[in-house]
Amino acid sequence: MKKRVLELMRVAPALLALGPVFCQVQSSGKSYAFEFTEVVDSTNGFNSIGSFPAINNHGEVAFRAASNGGTEGIFRAGQALDKLATIESTSDGLSFFGDDVAINPGGVVVFDATTASNSHSIYKGDGRSKILIADSMANGLSRIGVAAPSINASGNVAFSATLAQRGSPVAVFTGNGGPLTTVLSTSATGFSGFQNVAINDRGTIVFSASLRDGSSGVFTASDALVDIVDTNRKPEIASFGDPVINSAGVVADVAFLVVRGAPEIFTGTARRHGPE
């Protein structure tokens, strides 16, 4: 069994460069089939590729990468290499692109980067034009406190960020190229901090947060604030990861247990209101 696994690990990189392939692994009498389809690799002019690519329903993949010539940027690729598009790069005046990108069904990619004035900014773009969503300097945000953004089909972007104010309050924002809308803030609720957020096509935002009583939970915000799960009701859970949400409003996240520290994946929907 060990030899079979090692052989699969050794041949996989070569197979990935051949396009769609099928592999089968035998384990405990069960057969598992894997299909690998190349999107892009280091033979296409890149010397490094980011760790957190994103994919939409049309199979378009967005990712951060650096080219052999030293140009870093955000790219979008289809399954055919001739569909590779540069969304933004260092040649356009930005630098230090974040790994956490997101892409909507229309192929619009949201990403974060550092501007020439050393401001941390969030943009969305499709390779032809880009729109500024938030700028840490212009919007009064802490430059190092702008979290990974999420985007829905309408192009609305959601993210959390630390404000450059006394006490460093944290807030969840939405934006689409105009003024930012504050959805929640630690200065006005029972929350003490937010992790990365996600937004679905209906505009519902899901987020993991810590509360002032020391507990934590996963919540959604739209017309009302809803508590999906929290450590007060589920004391066997120690903490949560960054959640995601689909168009139907079903939330998925990882929970880390108190006893073993082992992760568990769960899904959930709205149950009751969270803290006011």
Image: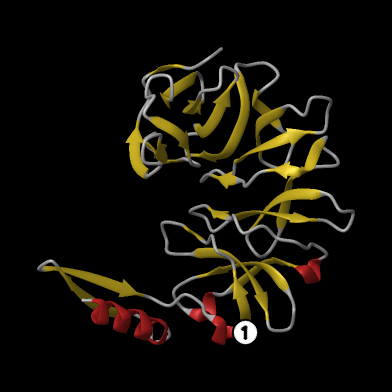
Residue 136 relative to residue 103: left or right? right
**Which image quadrant for residue 130?**
bottom right
Q: For the point 53% across and 75% down, which residue is it?
A: 83
The correct choice, above or below, for 9 with respect to 124 in the image is below
- Is residue 131 among the parts visible in the rendering? yes
Residue 73 relative to residue 244: left or right? right
Residue 157 relative to residue 200: left or right? right
Label 1 CA crowd tier, 10 Å (few <14, some 14–19, many 20+): few
Residue nearer the viewer, 273 or 258: 258
Q: Position of residue 123 (x, y in %)?
A: 70, 51
Mark 1 sits on what residue?
A: 45
- Is residue 179 among the parts visible in the rendering? no
**Which image quadrant for residue 189?**
top right
Residue located farthest toward the left when viewing the structure as drawn: 29
Residue nearer the viewer, 177 or 236: 236
Q: Amino acid at mark 1?
A: Gly
Q: For the point 36% across and 41% down, which residue is it?
A: 260
Give the quadrant of the C terminus: top right
Tell me the element at label 1.
loop
Residue 215 relative to residue 45: left or right? left
The correct choice, above or below, for 101 with respect to 167 in the image is below
Residue located farthest toward the right when viewing the structure as drawn: 117
Q: For the point 38% across and 19% down, which residue is it?
A: 233
